[in-house]
Amino acid sequence: MPDTHASEPSPRQTWRLTGAWMVVLAIILAVLGMGLALQQARSLSMRAMVQAQNRAVDIAEKGRVQFEQQLRASLRRIAEDVQGQRRRRWVPPEDWLPWIDGVYLWDASTLWELMPPSNATADQLEIMRDRLTQLPVRPPSGNRLYEPDMLDDRTGDLSVVSTVMWAEDADGSPIVIIGCIDAVGVRAGLIEPLFAPNDRLELVPREDARRLDRPWGQSLFGPARAWLIQPTESFLQEQRFTVMGQTLAYLGLTILSLATLLVALWLVLRVARREMALAELKANFVADVSHELKTPLAVIQLYTETLQAGRVSSPEKRQEYYSIITHESERLTNLINNILDFARIEAGRKEYTLEPADVGQVIRETYETYRAHLDQCDFEHNLTVEGGLPPVDADGDAIAQVLINLMTNALKYSEDERYLGIEVGKDTRRGRRGVLISVHDRGIGIRPEERSNLTEGFYRASDTRVRQKGGTGLGLALVKHIVDIHNGSLDVESRLVKGSTFRVFLPASERQAGRDNEHNGGKPILT
């Protein structure tokens, strides 16, 4: 039966899914943070606005209390003077309230004008007298003071309001005492002094309130009800700037936090991907090394058992088998040396002895060692060493290992055209004289996008032809490390199916820099 279980997601897919969810979560948190920031900014602004509104309520209440207290005391003084029969010759005292501008007395038959208003026209006074003579006269009840009332809404811009108090005449008959109150005087003499310089409030005519479009207005008591206490435009602008500034600050911090979170998330995911890739490379490395070790061991065992069994009678054939065993042993040794060297490099325990050396001689000896194997692999090969090479501060064994690894790659990744060319000559790079080692092959080539990763440990190209050849992915990493130790450079030139060229430049020995080696008269040697 076919397996119906869903395949488990790979670690890479799991990390991608986790990263996507973390990004979504970060964006959600950022949106929530921005919302809370806006709410906080609005809350701070509303707190300041509520404080201003409470201050307006407090001013209106204080004004009302002072107005009633002062008005009550003034009207009672008038009542006392009337009871003393001084109505005809009544003169306001020196401490008289400036906003009481007009005093009348009505006894149901006669309207006495004790102090005429100073800011009313003749028509307005006539309207006022007509209305006052319609007031009811009744016995007083505890000198009750009623709320002020507008005299007549039809008097246009008349700013006089009246307040009444029932009292008794000298003979005990009931009378009405009327005080005409100047609303403008109440505002200037009673309300405005209650404002402090930092209140950020102002008095606004009620008819202008709609035009100004303020968020709220506090109504005043009777005589001052033509005005509203409202926040000033500068205060409102300040609150707008405060909200905008705090919003932008919170928004900036939110964006910065989100960016930091996303960068941290990207770094975490990048590290995780690298760790996963490294773990995958190491796993592949173990498998490849197992295969690489198993193959030469199997060949050695096979040919050794054949020789021990005496099944090879021809001396030439035995010599061939010995050569194969020797080569596989060298191959195995080189593989183990690569692994050990890489481990020492990773641990920082790899040491090199750099001393003036003839690189041409090192390359020639290494090449001669591998010549027989190249012949067995049906490779066309040649070595060209230019004469008069400058000495190089080098570790001979390390330079030999560089050539061995480059030749091993050429042997492994060449298919139909089996060719290996090695050239050693003088060169100058970036003002430095030195030796250039070039290794050419006509193998499968390297993809352009993979060249930058060739010298990474455990790295192997994704080409299936490379994967089929096996390998550890350490050869070129060791080559790059050795070249760097020698202060040299490694260049790669490659075309798919056309082959590759690896060039290793090693600078001349500084201890021999003063010597001119170009007069040795040597000619290129073709081997």
Image: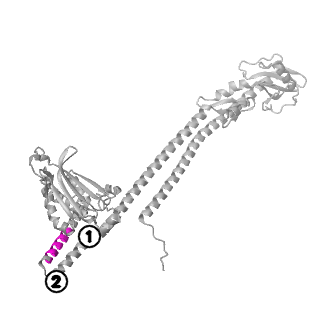
In what element is the residue under mark 1? helix
Residue 257 spot, x, y in % from top left: 46, 48
Whether residue 312 sits left or right of residue 84 in the image: it is: left
* 314 shown above or below 503: below
The tag on residue 292 is 1
Residue at position x 17%, y 73% in the image = 325
Q: Quadrant of the C terminus?
A: bottom left
Q: Nearer the viewer, residue 381 or 472?
A: 381
Q: Nearer the viewer, residue 519 or 391?
A: 519
What's the magenta region? 317-332
- Mark 1 or 2, closer to the camera: 2
Q: Quadrant of residue 49?
A: top right
Residue at position x 31%, y 70% in the image = 287
Residue at position x 42%, y 65% in the image = 11
Whether residue 453 sits left or right of residue 313 in the image: it is: right
Residue 496 spot, x, y in % from top left: 32, 59
**Mark 2 Cα shell of 10 Å, populated few (<14), some (14-19), many (≥20):** few
The reply to whether the magenta stretch includes residue 21 is: no
Residue 235 spot, x, y in % from top left: 60, 33
Residue 202 spot, x, y in % from top left: 65, 30
Whether residue 491 sits left or right of residue 155 in the image: it is: left
Asked if the residue at tag 2 contacts the one at tag 1, i.e. Cβ–Cβ closer than 8 Å, the answer is no
Tell me the amino acid under the disc marked 1: Glu
The residue pinned by badge 2 equals: 311
Q: Nearer the viewer, residue 442 or 114?
A: 442
Residue positioned most to the right = 109
Q: Main secondary structure of the magenta part?
A: helix
